[in-house]
């Protein structure tokens, strides 16, 4: 009978991972013990023998990345991180799922050393992994020279049945296979269990064939979840396959070793209970009444990865020092990109516009500004979901990223909004690049889950969303965003900017590039807009403060304040003139970003929206939700309360009240 005295060191370490995970879930009375019990051998093998990593410096740039896409199995990751010497203590394990602990219910980026991304919503971790692999491939093609392989690492991810049921997994697999991302390896934990029960209730995919159809290299190990030799050989085979990403299918048994709960949905998402924990420990040959036990020798055995990792990092640092002498400009460029440091003078040549350029769609101007930035910022990379010709987001100083040209910076995502957003997060998480992602604003509905996680993680992804309102026109309500501005304004850490003319676009991009504390969403028009005469109107640099007085009232105090964003601001300027003909003195405020305006001090905010002027009218071709914050209880809003309609935009907009005549009418009604 197995016991601590006759177990190999491998067995001791694996069972330590299992029992730490079980004990933490039991102590928290919450969590998912089954997958850590089943996949402990893989986690052990990866962290002990396979991954290139340094627990003393979890952010070493050339480390291998491991993503636990099956984020519910977080204790698997926390346990192995602790044993390897990451700054995750035994007390941290005991505080699993407790308020303010660094061991939350699902892994959270920047909360726990060694956690590469926030996972939990299934399918998202593997989508991040595709972005990381794209980043590695692009940076290697851009910076490696001769024997200086300064970017050279693998991206691994552990996914579950649930990950592969999610639709984004198809998008992710398709993109990775098409781009031949050979340094991407997924492990599929094929345990046949989900929360409702056996996966056969709803899931009968032939996963190997599916991935072969996506041009992946597939290794089906079958019943080898506990076979370290077989697992190791499969990983080596996957690493040897350079032209295809690899999927290693592992048939595991959830809750392995729990005599009454193995292979049940109970083991998936609930504590096992004291008696079953004891029974499982007995099966492992473990002391049944010991909690959080780490047998003698296990820590020494596991933490030798620290010296191994330090040696690997030291060798890399030495190589990089030589690289820097040989290629100083490339080295400086890479270091700046990793530090998110913009080059000197990056914005010195950003375009400024005058009315003689004629009417221009902000999406078109956005493309001009973005390309001007790309000339100075070589690490700007991204693409659109099959919509570059419409969103105007093609970088003209590069071609399309492809399996034959990883150095290129235009990523053709195809009609795949979710993976575009999820992989863009992965690119940002990898570091060394500044990603952008673009589609029609309405299709953020397909990308929102990944955008939300980017906001949670404070990732500096730039989203360029065009066709921003019912001004889309003929395409009709299916393509006309109504509630979207309100919904993204409600998203914490998101900075949404809806510029009103060409110069506001320039300033919006300036803000976006300097915002490294979270995502920025630039919301652009399809239709053409006039360029404001800045000799009469205020400078567009007010965009950086979120709102500014575009056109001041003539007298000492305005009778009414007209507030708007985007395409509706032009209506306010014209209405201001018409109201003046009736001796009504109006102030026009352009408010492209609520989030930026909220960050200003009270003196500035009251200078833009003086509290003594109670009559305020907001005009925006979107939901009116939230505008009460700015117009107060004596103000009004012209906005959308229904879906849109199909027709020429010049007819659709006034149909819903977005006209100078209606702004004047509603202003006068407020002043009665």
Image: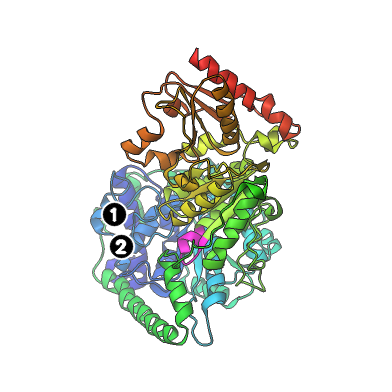
Q: Nearer the viewer, residue 599 or 176?
A: 599
- Count of all numbered marks drawn on residues in the image: 2
Residue of label 1: 93
Quadrant of the image occupied by residue 110? bottom left
Q: Residues within 10 Å of mark 1 (few under 14, many from 20)?
A: many
Q: Position of residue 266 (x, y in %)?
A: 44, 43
Q: Is residue 500 visible?
A: yes
Q: From the viewer's perspective, is residue 156 above or below residue 145? A: above
Say what secondary structure mark 1 lies in.
helix
Position in image of residue 327 (x %, y %): 47, 84
Relative height, residue 528 to residue 257 (above, below): above
User: Residues in magenta?
Assistant: 426-434
Indicate whether residue 153 is drawn in magenta: no
Residue 193 drawn at (x, y percent): 53, 48
Left or right: 595 with respect to 446?
A: left
- Residue that numbered label 2 is attached to: 82
**454 sits to left or right of 505:** left
Instruction: Tell me how far mark 1 sits from mark 2, CA to CA.
Output: 8 Å
Q: Quadrant of residue 634?
A: top left
- Residue drawn at x 29%, y 45% as measured from the top left: 98
Viewer-proximal residue, 349 or 167?
349
Out of 671 and 15, give the one closest to the viewer. Answer: 671
**Proximity of marks 1 and 2: CB atoms separated by less than 8 Å:** yes
Q: Quadrant of the N terminus?
A: bottom left
């Amino acid at each position: 009978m197995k016991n601590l005295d006759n177990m190999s060191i491998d067995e001791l370490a694996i069972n330590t991972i299992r029992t730490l995970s079980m004990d933490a879930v039991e102590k928290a009375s919450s969590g998912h013990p089954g997958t850590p019990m089943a996949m402990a051998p893989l986690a052990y093998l990866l962290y002990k023998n396979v991954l290139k990593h340094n627990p003393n410096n979890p952010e070493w740039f050339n480390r291998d990345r491991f993503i636990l896409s099956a984020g519910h199995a977080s204790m698997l990751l926390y346990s192995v991180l602790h044993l390897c010497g990451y700054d995750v203590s035994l007390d941290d394990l005991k505080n699993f799922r407790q308020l303010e602990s660094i061991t939350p219910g699902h892994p959270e980026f920047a909360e726990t050393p060694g956690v590469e991304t926030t996972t939990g919503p299934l399918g998202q971790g593997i989508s991040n992994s595709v972005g990381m692999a794209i980043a590695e491939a692009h940076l290697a093609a851009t910076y490696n020279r001769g024997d200086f392989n300064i970017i050279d690492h693998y991206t691994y991810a552990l996914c579950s049945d649930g990950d592969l049921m999610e639709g984004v997994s198809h998008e992710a697999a398709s993109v990775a296979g098409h781009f031949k991302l050979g340094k991407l390896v997924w492990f599929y934990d094929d345990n046949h269990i989900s929360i409702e029960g056996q996966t056969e209730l709803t899931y009968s995919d032939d996963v190997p064939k599916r991935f072969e159809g996506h041009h992946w290299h597939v290794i089906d190990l079958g019943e080898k979840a506990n076979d370290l030799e077989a697992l190791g050989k499969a990983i080596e085979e996957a690493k040897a396959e350079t032209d295809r990403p690899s999927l290693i299918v592992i048939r595991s048994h959830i809750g392995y070793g729990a005599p009454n709960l193995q292979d049940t949905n109970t083991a998936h998402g609930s504590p096992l209970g004291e008696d079953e924990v004891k029974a499982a420990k007995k099966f492992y040959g473990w002391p049944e009444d010991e909690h959080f036990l780490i047998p003698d020798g296990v820590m020494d055995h596991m933490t030798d990865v620290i010296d191994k990792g330090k040696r690997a990092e030291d060798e890399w640092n030495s190589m990089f020092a030589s690289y820097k002498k040989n290629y100083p400009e490339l080295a400086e460029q890479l270091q700046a990109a990793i530090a998110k440091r913009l080059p000197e003078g990056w914005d010195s040549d950003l375009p400024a516009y005058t009315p003689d350029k004629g009417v221009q769609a902000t999406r078109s101007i956005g493309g001009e500004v973005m390309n001007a930035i790309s000339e100075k910022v070589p690490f700007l990379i991204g693409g659109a979901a099959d919509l570059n010709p419409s969103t105007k987001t093609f970088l003209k100083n590069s071609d399309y990223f492809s399996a034959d040209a990883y150095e290129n910076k235009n990523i053709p995502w195809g009609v795949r909004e979710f993976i575009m957003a999820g992989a863009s997060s992965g690119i940002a998480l990898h570091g060394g690049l500044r990603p952008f992602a673009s589609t029609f604003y309405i299709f953020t509905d397909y990308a929102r889950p990944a955008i939300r996680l980017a906001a949670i993680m404070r990732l500096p992804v730039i989203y360029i969303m065009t066709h921003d309102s019912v001004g889309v026109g003929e395409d009709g309500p299916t393509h006309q965003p109504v509630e979207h501005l309100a919904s993204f304004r409600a998203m914490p850490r998101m900075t949404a900017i809806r510029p009103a003319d060409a110069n506001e676009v320039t300033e919006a991009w300036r803000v976006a590039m300097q915002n490294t504390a979270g995502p920025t969403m630039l919301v652009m028009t399809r239709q053409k807009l006039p360029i404001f005469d800045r000799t009469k109107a205020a400078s567009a640099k007010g965009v950086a403060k979120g709102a500014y007085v575009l056109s001041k009232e003539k007298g000492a105090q305005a009778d009414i304040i007209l507030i708007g964003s985007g395409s509706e601001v032009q209506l306010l300027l014209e209405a201001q003139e018409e109201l003046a003909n009736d001796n009504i003195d109006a102030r026009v405020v352009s408010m492209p970003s609520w989030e930026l305006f909220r960050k200003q001090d009270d003196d500035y905010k009251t200078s833009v929206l003086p509290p003594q002027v109670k009559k305020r009218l907001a005009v925006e071709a979107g939901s009116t939700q939230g505008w009460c914050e700015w117009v107060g209880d004596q103000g009004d809003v012209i906005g959308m309360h229904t879906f849109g309609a199909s027709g020429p935009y010049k007819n659709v907009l006034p149909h819903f009240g977005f006209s100078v005549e209606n702004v004047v009418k509603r202003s006068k009604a407020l002043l009665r």
